[in-house]
Every structure is written in C-alpha cells, then in structure tokens.
Amino acid sequence: MLVALPGAAVALLALTFREPIRHERTTSTVRVDDTVRYVRANGFLYAALMLGAAVSSIGSYGLYGWVPALFQRVHGWTAHG
C-alpha cells in the first residue's frame, strides 16, 4: 500500500494536465479488401503466428495440468493445501 501511494499521487497529478492541441489532421481510410489482400499476401506469416499461439496454449494447458501432480509427488504436497 505504501509503495502504491506515490503512483496514485502521480496519477491524480496527471489528471490536471491538458492534452496539447493537434494542428495537423490525418485521416486514414483502409478498405477491407486492401486488408484481406495484405493478409493473403502474407499468409505464411499469419499461419505461423496462429500455429505458434496454438502450440503455446497447448503447452501451457499441459503444464498447468502436470505441475500440481509434480508438486504432490516430489514435495509431498496435498491437493487441498
């Protein structure tokens, strides 16, 4: 709690600052077909990213299921604390 107090004070202080006025206007119009074309052109990259995320999730779920049994067997812990 004591460590969080300075952060809370800075957060309250940040509320008193005004956002600077923006002088330039930028508009970005990206059409859906442009996005689809970009994803298809880089399909291997997106497939690798999705496959990596899936494999990482499978590994994490397997680890979460295995670690409690490891602690029970190695350290003699019980399932109910």
Image (tube, grey):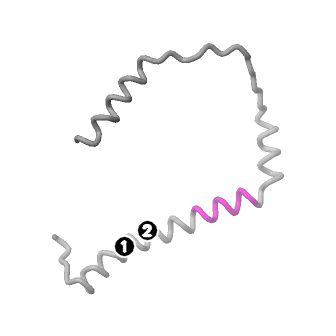
Q: Is residue 27 magenta?
A: no
Q: What element carries label 1?
A: helix
Left or right? Give the position of 63 relative to 45.
Answer: left
Image location of residue 26, percent across then percent down = 74, 21
Image location of residue 54, percent across then percent down = 57, 64
Residue pointed to by mark 2: 61
Residue pointed to by mark 1: 65
Which of 42 and 17 lies nearest the eye of the viewer? 17
Q: Residue 28 carries which label?
A: none
Instruction: Identify residue type, mark 2.
Output: Tyr
The N terminus: image quadrant: top left
Q: Is residue 50 above or below residue 5?
A: below
Task: Determine contact: label 1, label 2, CB under 8 Å.
Answer: yes
The C terminus: image quadrant: bottom left
Instruction: Identify residue type, mark 1.
Output: Gly
Image location of residue 65, percent across then percent down = 36, 73
Q: Which residue does the image show at 73% across and 17% down from the upper left?
A: 25
Question: For residue 37, which quarter of the picture?
Answer: top right
Q: Which residue does the image show at 78% across and 43% down from the upper left?
A: 36
Q: Residue furthest bottom?
A: 74
Q: Give, as a single range, the part of the protein colored magenta.
A: 45-53
